[in-house]
């Protein structure tokens, strides 16, 4: 039986949820986990793990209701200091510790003779409309939940909810509205720090499908092209029980890619969190510095390059036209997951595009003959044609990147040196050391000298000079907004090229990653046969999906 690749026995679904937490939320949870009042960690590992799972899965509804009753107990036992005297004064949050503190406090509290009763495993509240018991074993987790709520929302917000509850009527049913108020506050806060409810349903749907299709467990590697096709073909028709739409093949690909990203992030975070100090001794549980840096760079790096190109200041330059943006849209959206699902990307760009045209034709109530032709994929772009388009797009991105280098050098921007090294990594720029000398006010002069020297082939050498010649030629050949001589005179132009150049390179890197992955799994000799087989499969699926509509 294959085993889910997980730390501490965590399920793949839970790993995906863990991976979806924001850095800020992780820090808030870590603050609670690292609480130390001088007697060691206040909360044990099981309590911390339970808290993380509860918050990550947004499963805090019932615990918050239970918490309201604990606040009643702690307020009575805390005397003039109120509930914080019980929940915050406990140095180590254990069942036995809470038992001792509450039993001692109850001896001098009249309320414990009337409204509260010490029972074997906790405290029972005698509300007029029914009793409620909070066990000592639950108090550690509920105390940790309070500390998290205060860390996330602030003292005033949380204490305000508790005060409203304590000032309300003494009744079992009165607790619900106040628990719901705190739940809404947490929900509003967490919506920016956790995967959406729709994403959580998607994770659950996919993991259940995988378990049903592949048995007792699966690894990250099982989330591959074959699984995407099987999920789209048999994972549900229009919508599943959770309401997620998987009619379109692209939607299925994106759901699998999101699950891969979330699972990978969850596994990596657990690997780092469970490690001892940073170091090279893996046998001692240390995490390698390069591994840690890789995790941080992977999850804190720049986002979608197309979004960066569409945002100021890069948007002042028209790096991509509409057709190029559309061709890069899926690849940019999938990011590093694209090369892991190369056939799926190719299928979306061919059959997925055809599905889009089919859907539009049905919405327009087109002639049945036209719909039938689209269902049969009679004029669908082939795999070879799409791969050739990617090759042309790659050349265009290279030309745009070179043009940006020339524009940056012309504008006297320091980013030009970075771009040159990217395009000519083997260039020898050591002669620039003499030009770069300078300090204080002379640094600006030195920078100008460096940029001037970059244009001098006798200083930078033939390799760099060749690249700069190509860059100037590329700049002259592009007639889009921002590239003309007049447009480049705008002082803001330099900022646009400085922001856009790395984004163009990032888009090209993503495209190159997918192209290489496709070449590895689909050699030229196999493309025609694979396309024909896939066309038959997709046509049959389209017929099943849109039969009633046509």
Image: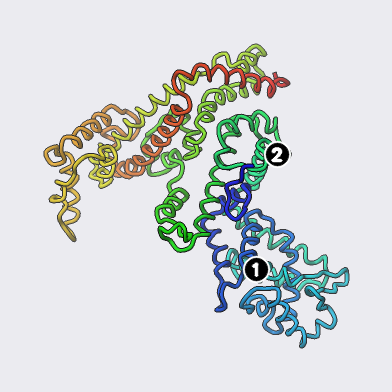
Tell how many labels.
2
Q: Residue furthest top?
A: 369
Q: Is residue 450 above or below residue 109?
A: above
Left or right: where 90 falls relative to 296: right
* Front position in the image: 403 or 125: 125
Question: Does residue 528 sit above or below 272 in this rendering?
Answer: above
Give the residue at x 58% y 63%.
152
Give the mark nearer the N terminus: 1 vs 2.
Answer: 1
List x then y, in percent, for residue 381: 51, 18
**Residue at the spot of label 2:** 243
- Residue 406, located in which quarter of the rendered image? top left
- The picture places residue 458, in percent across and down from the top left corner, at 11, 38
Disc number for residue 115: none
Q: Quadrant of the C terminus?
A: top right
Quarter of the figure that contains the N terminus = top right
Residue 284 visible at all: yes
Q: Is disc 2 placed on a helix, strand or loop? A: loop
Which residue reaches farthest left? Answer: 458
Q: Quadrant of residue 253?
A: top right
Closer to the camera in the image, 85 or 525 = 525
In-front residue for pair 474/288: 288
> Relative to 65, does residue 545 appear above or below in the rendering?
above
Name the residue that disc number 1 marks.
Answer: 146
Residue for point 70% across, 62% down: 181
Q: Residues within 10 Å of mark 2 (few under 14, many from 20)?
A: few
């Amino acid at each position: 039986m294959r085993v889910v690749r997980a730390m501490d026995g965590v399920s793949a679904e839970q790993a995906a949820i863990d991976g979806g937490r924001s850095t800020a939320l992780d820090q808030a949870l870590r603050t609670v986990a690292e609480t130390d009042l001088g007697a060691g960690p206040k909360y044990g590992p099981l309590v911390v793990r339970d808290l993380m799972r509860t918050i990550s899965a947004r499963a805090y509804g019932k615990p918050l209701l239970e918490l309201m009753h604990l606040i009643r107990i702690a307020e009575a036992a805390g005397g003039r200091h109120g509930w914080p005297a019980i929940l915050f004064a406990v140095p180590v949050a254990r069942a036995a510790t809470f038992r001792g503190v509450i039993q001692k406090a109850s001896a001098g509290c009249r309320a414990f003779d009337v409204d509260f009763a010490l029972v074997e495993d906790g405290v029972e509240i005698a509300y007029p409309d029914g009793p409620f018991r909070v066990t000592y074993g639950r108090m550690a987790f509920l105390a940790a939940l309070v500390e998290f709520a205060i860390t996330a929302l602030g003292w005033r917000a949380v204490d305000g909810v508790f005060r409203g509850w304590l000032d309300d009527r003494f009744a079992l049913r009165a607790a619900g509205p106040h628990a719901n108020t705190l739940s809404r506050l947490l929900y509003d806060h967490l919506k920016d720090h956790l995967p959406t409810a729709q994403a959580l349903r998607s994770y659950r749907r996919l993991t259940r499908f995988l378990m049903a299709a592949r048995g007792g467990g699966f690894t990250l590697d099982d989330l591959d092209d074959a699984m995407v096709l099987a999920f789209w073909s048999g994972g549900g028709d229009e919508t599943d029980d959770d309401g997620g739409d998987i009619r379109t093949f692209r939607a299925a690909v994106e759901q699998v890619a999101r699950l891969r990203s979330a699972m990978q992030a969850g596994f990596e975070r657990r690997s780092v969190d469970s490690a001892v100090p940073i170091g090279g001794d893996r046998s001692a549980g240390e995490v390698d510095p390069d591994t840690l840096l890789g995790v941080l760079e992977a999850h804190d790096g720049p986002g979608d390059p197309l979004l960066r190109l569409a945002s100021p200041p890069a948007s002042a330059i028209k790096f991509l036209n509409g057709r190029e943006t559309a061709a890069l849209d899926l690849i940019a959206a999938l990011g590093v997951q694209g090369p892991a699902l190369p056939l799926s990307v190719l299928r979306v760009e061919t059959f997925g595009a055809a599905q889009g045209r089919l859907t539009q034709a049905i919405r327009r109530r087109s002639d049945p003959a036209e719909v039938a032709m689209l269902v049969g994929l009679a004029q669908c772009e082939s795999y070879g044609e799409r791969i050739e388009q990617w090759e042309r797009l790659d050349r265009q991105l290279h030309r745009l990147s070179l043009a940006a280098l020339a524009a940056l050098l012309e504008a006297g921007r320091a980013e030009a040196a970075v771009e040159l090294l990217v395009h000519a990594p083997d260039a020898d720029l050591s002669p620039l050391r003499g030009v770069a000398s300078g300090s204080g006010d002379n640094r600006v002069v030195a920078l100008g000298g460096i940029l001037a020297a970059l244009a001098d082939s006798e200083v930078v050498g033939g390799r760099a000079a060749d690249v700069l010649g190509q860059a100037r030629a590329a700049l002259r050949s592009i007639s889009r907004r921002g590239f003309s001589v007049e447009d480049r005179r705008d002082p803001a132009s330099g900022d646009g090229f400085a922001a856009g150049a790395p984004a163009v390179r990032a888009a090209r890197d993503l495209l190159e990653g997918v192209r290489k992955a496709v070449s590895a799994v689909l050699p030229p000799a196999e493309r025609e046969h694979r396309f024909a087989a896939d066309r038959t499969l997709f046509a049959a699926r389209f017929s099943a999906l849109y039969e009633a509509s046509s």
